[in-house]
Amino acid sequence: MAELLTACRFYFEADGVSEKLVLEVAGLSVESPVAGDGGVHGSGKSGVRIRQATPTVEKFSNVTVKMVATTDVDLYDWYKNCNTNDGGSSAWDSNRKASSISAYDQAGNIQARWELVNAYPCKYEGPSFTASDSNMANETLELVHEGITRVQ
């Protein structure tokens, strides 16, 4: 039987973004929508209805990564470097990063790994502060990317 993965032993990393305490990763999703929504494509001779399930271009959802906020500003800087557009000078293309999510077993060995191709943050969310809150402050990045590959 294959190793059972737990949802609580994982890590996110991107080129130059590491040593973060990661709270949550969501949105590892890919689908191939069906052409014509799987419905009837038309009616032919003798009233025969034609149906065909044909896959189209893959569709990837954005990946959301929530991390414990620290004094480092690298997450915000990554967002800013990708999304500042002052008269066409945005450098998002050169700031895309190879990123990955790894799941670990109880011994700390990687058991599964998903890679994001050319990821960059399209949304940054800073912490919410509440005087009575006992939780750690956190930052959230929403990453757009060119594909998800499960490599392990």
Image (spheres, grey):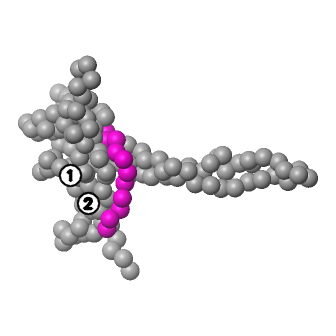
28 over 73 or under it: above or below: below
Disc 2 target residue: 102
Instruction: Identify the residue shown where x is 84% and y is 50%.
Output: 44
- Assess whether residue 145 is covered by the magenta stretch: yes
Magenta stretch: dominant SS? strand
Near mark 1 (Cα within 10 A), the count class, few <14, some 14-19 or many ≥20, is some
Circles 2 and 1: CB distance less than 8 Å? yes
Q: Amino acid at mark 1?
A: Glu
87 vs 106, nearest the viewer: 87
**Is any part of residue 148 visible from this angle?**
yes
Residue 148 position, x and y percent, is 37, 54
Q: If the image is split into quadrants, where does the C terminus sit? A: bottom left
The quarter holding residue 137 reads top left
Outermost residue toward the top in this view: 87
Instruction: Describe the element under mark 1 as helix, strand or loop.
Output: strand
3 over 121 or under it: above or below: below
Outermost residue toward the right in this view: 46
Residue span colored magenta? 140-152
